Amino acid sequence: MALAVALGIALVLAFAWQTISTYWLKEAGLYTFVLAALAGVWVTNFFMILPLISPDVIHLVPYSVSLLSKLLFGLVAAAVLSHRASVVVATRPT
């Protein structure tokens, strides 16, 4: 039963994510969208999932270091995606 509930929640979140991501990408831009998404993943990992798996894992890496690492990864990912999109547009035949 718990698996059915988890899959149902995941399905609803997937549809919501698709709608929200389309809106955010148009309004806020790629960098804001990627940073917000990765910050959400970090919050979920450090405050929900990791305490359930092993409470000691959280004390291995300080919050500030792990958040900074995640956000720097997001900046680089957004830069790569932005550059990739511009290359694809520039090489498209007219």
Image: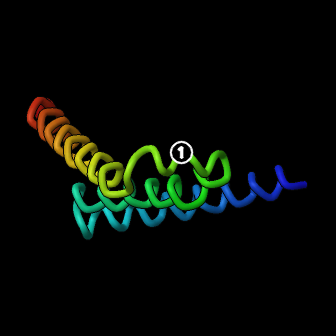
Q: Quadrant of the C terminus?
A: top left
Residue drawn 61% across the image and 51% down it: 55
Residue drawn 26% across the image and 70% down it: 27
Count of numbered circles in the view: 1
Residue drawn 82% across the image and 50% down it: 3
Classify mark 1: helix, strand or loop.
helix
Residue drawn 58% across the image and 55% down it: 14
**Image x and y of residue 32, in percent:** 25, 62
**Image x and y of residue 56, in percent:** 57, 47
Q: Is residue 87 left or right of residue 26?
A: left
Q: Is residue 2 left or right of residue 80?
A: right
- Is 64 situated above or below 87? below
Q: Quadrant of residue 86?
A: top left
Front-most of 33 and 21?
33
- Three-letter amino acid code at the position of disc 1: Val
Front-most of 2 and 78?
2
**Image x and y of residue 45, in percent:** 52, 52
**What crowding class fits label 1: few (fewer than 14 Cα within 10 Å), some (14-19), or many (20 or more)?**
few
Q: Quadrant of the N terminus?
A: bottom right
Residue matched to label 1 = 57
Q: Is residue 29 left or right of residue 57?
A: left
- Colour setup of the view: rainbow
Extreme right residue here?
A: 1
Front-most of 57 and 34?
57
- Is 30 situated above or below 20? above
